[in-house]
Amino acid sequence: MRIQDVLLLIAAVLLITLVVIQSTKDNAANAFSGEKSELFSHQKERGIELFLSRATLTVALVFIGLALWAMI
């Protein structure tokens, strides 16, 4: 395996982990009933939610960059 492949694999695992640990903004009961709750839709992210959101965006961009680099 090349170094690009190893870095891409690490970024992929990190991205999956970040997405899985983020909390959902919808209630699970509403997902199955088809109901859409708008109660907290306009609330800003703060603290750990903001950090996780920015970290996910950063790792996603790194993943895309590594994927393009690995194609070369």
Image (cartoon, grey):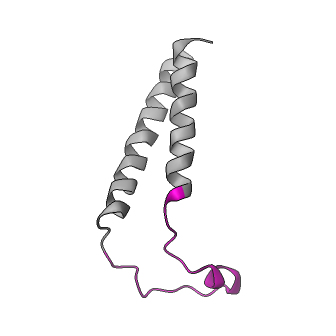
Does 10 appear above or below 54? above
Q: Is residue 24 magenta?
A: yes
Q: Residue at x 54, y 27 (%)?
A: 8
Magenta stretch encompasses residue 33: yes
Give percent across and percent down for residue 60.
45, 41
On screen, 49 above or below 34? Answer: above
Q: Residue at x 39, y 56 (%)?
A: 53
Would you place residue 21 above or below residue 26 in this image?
Answer: above
Q: Is residue 23 left or right of residue 61?
A: right
Magenta stretch? 21-43
Residue 32: where, in percent of width, then height? 70, 81
In front of the other: 64 or 19: 19
Q: Give the total number of marks visible in the rendering.
A: 0
For the N terminus, the image quarter is top right
Residue 50 rendering spot, x and y as whole percentages: 32, 60
Whether residue 44 sits left or right of residue 6 in the image: it is: left
Q: Residue at x 58, y 29 (%)?
A: 9
Determine which quarter of the picture holds residue 35: bottom right
